[in-house]
Image (spheres, rainbow, N blue to C red):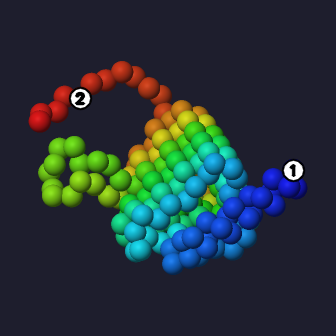
């Protein structure tokens, strides 16, 4: 166990060196097959103390994106964080396996010249995010909130609440 933690800290250090102009960090752990990628010299990544990122997690920051992960955040296996504008994850937040966090959508309607529609994702402190959750752009999750497994989250989740996404089939047509 101690060896895997040591190797994770070493992997994090190597990532911080590779992206030294993009990453500001303290001690954190990046387990096997996880990666942090900054796809622009303008991308900014802040990783606080004692952040633990498990296996097979992908963190990607594009363009002028700003990703901020505060102290003692735990990110479990197979999570994906895609940042093109701004994502903030508050301290003591726990993220279960297979969670996807995106601050942008693809502009499939082509209403503007940009190929992405950008927003923000702000996750408060001490938040628990269950397995297989998808968090979409323009989402604010308050402190101490719990996001139930399998939920799709967009909009405002008040502090000290449990968010449960009940699903019903619906179809929304759109014109090309």
Residue 137 position within the rendered picture, expressed as x and y whole percent measured from the top left? 39, 52
The answer to which of marks 2 and 1 sits earlier in the sequence is 1
At x 74% / y 58%, what residue is drawn?
A: 8
Task: Pick the residue in front: 175 or 116.
Answer: 116
Q: Within 10 angstroms of label 1, few (less than 14), some, or many (20 or more) residues? A: few
Q: Do the residues labelled 2 and 1 touch (CB within 8 Å)?
A: no
Residue 49 position within the rendered picture, expressed as x and y whole percent measured from the top left? 71, 70
Which quadrant holds residue 125?
Answer: bottom right
At x 52% / y 48%, what residue is drawn?
A: 80
Dot 2 lies on which element? loop
Q: Within 10 angstroms of label 2, few (less than 14), some, or many (20 or more) residues? A: few
Q: Is residue 122 in view?
A: no
Which quadrant holds residue 126?
Answer: bottom right
* Camera-side mark, 2 or 1: 1
Q: Is residue 22 in view?
A: yes
Residue 118 shown left or right of residue 3 in the figure = left
At x 81% / y 53%, what residue is drawn?
A: 4
Dot 1 lies on which element? loop
**Vertically, is 165 above or below 147?**
above
Residue 68 shown left or right of residue 97 in the figure = left
Residue extending farthest to the top is 169
At x 60% / y 42%, what residue is drawn?
A: 78
Q: Considering the image in quadrants, where does the C terminus appear?
A: top left
Residue 95 position within the rendered picture, expressed as x and y whole percent measured from the top left? 63, 48
- The residue to which callout 2 is attached is 172
Residue extending farthest to the bottom is 21
- The residue to which callout 1 is attached is 1
Q: How far apart are marks 2 and 1 (CA)?
A: 49 Å
Residue 111 position within the rendered picture, expressed as x and y whole percent measured from the top left? 14, 51
């Amino acid at each position: 166990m101690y060896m895997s933690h040591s190797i994770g800290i070493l992997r994090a250090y190597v990532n911080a060196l590779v992206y030294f102009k993009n990453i500001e960090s303290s001690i954190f752990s990046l387990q096997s097959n996880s990666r942090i990628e900054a796809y622009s010299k303008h991308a900014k990544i802040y990783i606080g103390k004692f952040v633990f990122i498990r296996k097979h997690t992908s963190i990607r920051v594009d363009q002028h994106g700003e990703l901020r992960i505060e102290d003692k955040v735990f990110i479990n296996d197979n999570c994906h964080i895609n940042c093109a504008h701004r994502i903030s994850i508050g301290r003591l937040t726990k993220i279960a396996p297979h969670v996807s966090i995106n601050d942008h959508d693809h502009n499939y309607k082509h209403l503007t010249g940009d190929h992405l529609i950008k927003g923000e994702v702000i996750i408060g402190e001490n938040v628990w995010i269950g397995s297989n959750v998808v968090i979409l752009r323009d989402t604010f999750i308050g402190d101490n909130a719990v996001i139930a497994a399998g939920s799709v989250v967009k909009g405002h989740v008040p502090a000290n609440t449990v968010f449960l996404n009940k699903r019903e089939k619906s179809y929304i047509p759109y014109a090309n």
